Image (spheres, rainbow, N blue to C red):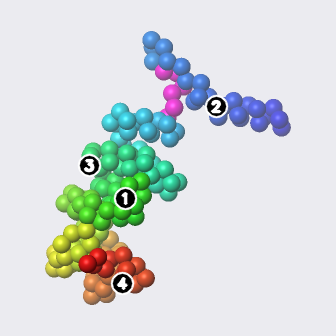
């Protein structure tokens, strides 16, 4: 049993034994956080790297999540834009900034992302991080609903009552600050 454990430990450590020679790298890291961060640093983002930003955020590694999501957003991944909005709206890895959060959702909406359309529509209806424009907000929620986004359909069916999506306990956050 001990022998099997030692063998498994050695195999698990194999990526750490990577060596570089004139012929390339043997045993390179492939599916590790270090490799994902290296990809971001070198401007190589893909769906797997961008999805890892979620794990980074949920594990409290907000600075690297921001770096990852920003690189992915720059590459056109709209889900990264909506995650940046989430981080700015909740002060994760940077100060709470509803204006910046709304700007990220606007970018995602303009790129055609249903979640971005819904989020930006809600921000427009509330006037949260952007000038209030209920009619424009409803149009975006309608577009998100037409794209099949369940929460947008639910809010539209509730007559655009935003308490349908966000409990009224959160209303303090969206109240005017003046």
- Which residue does the image show at 32% across and 44% down from the upper left? 71
Q: Is residue 81 visible?
A: yes
**Label placed on residue 163:** 4
**Label placed on residue 105:** none
Between the residue at mark 1 and the residue at mark 4, the CA separation in whole angstroms equals 26 Å
In the rendered image, which residue does mark 1 sit on?
95
In the rendered image, which residue does mark 2 sit on?
13
Question: Which of the two labelled residues, at mark 3 and mark 2, occupies the earlier sequence position?
Answer: 2
Question: Which of the two labelled residues, at mark 4 and mark 2, occupies the earlier sequence position?
Answer: 2
In the rendered image, which residue does mark 3 sit on?
76
Between the residue at mark 3 and the residue at mark 2, the CA separation in whole angstroms equals 35 Å
- Which residue does the image show at 32% across and 71% down from the upper left? 149
Q: Are marks 1 and 4 in contact (CB under 8 Å)?
A: no
Q: Secondary structure at mark 3?
A: loop
Image height check: is 106 above or below 56? below
Q: What span is colored magenta in the figure?
A: 25-30
Mark nearer the viewer, 3 or 1 = 1
Q: Secondary structure at mark 2?
A: loop
The crowding category of the residue bearing disc 1, from other C-alpha atoms within 10 Å (few below 14, some 14 to 19, many at least 20), is few
Between the residue at mark 4 and the residue at mark 3, the CA separation in whole angstroms equals 31 Å
Q: Are marks 3 and 2 in contact (CB under 8 Å)?
A: no
């Amino acid at each position: 049993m001990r022998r099997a454990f030692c063998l498994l430990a050695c195999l698990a450590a194999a990526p750490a034994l990577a060596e570089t020679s004139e012929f390339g790298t043997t045993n390179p890291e492939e599916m590790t956080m270090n490799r994902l961060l290296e990809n971001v640093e070198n401007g190589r983002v893909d769906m797997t790297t961008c999805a890892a930003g979620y794990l980074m955020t949920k594990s409290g590694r907000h600075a690297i999540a921001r770096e990852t999501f920003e690189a992915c957003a720059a590459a056109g991944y709209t889900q990264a834009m909506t995650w940046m909005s989430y981080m700015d709206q909740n002060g994760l890895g940077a100060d709470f900034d509803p204006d910046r959060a709304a700007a990220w959702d606007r970018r995602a909406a303009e790129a055609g992302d249903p979640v971005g359309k819904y989020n930006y529509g809600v921000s427009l209806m509330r006037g949260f991080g952007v000038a209030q424009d209920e009619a424009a907000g409803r149009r975006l929620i309608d577009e998100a609903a037409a794209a099949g986004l369940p929460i947008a359909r639910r809010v539209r069916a509730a007559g655009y009552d935003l308490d349908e999506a966000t409990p009224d306990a959160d209303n303090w956050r969206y109240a005017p600050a003046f």
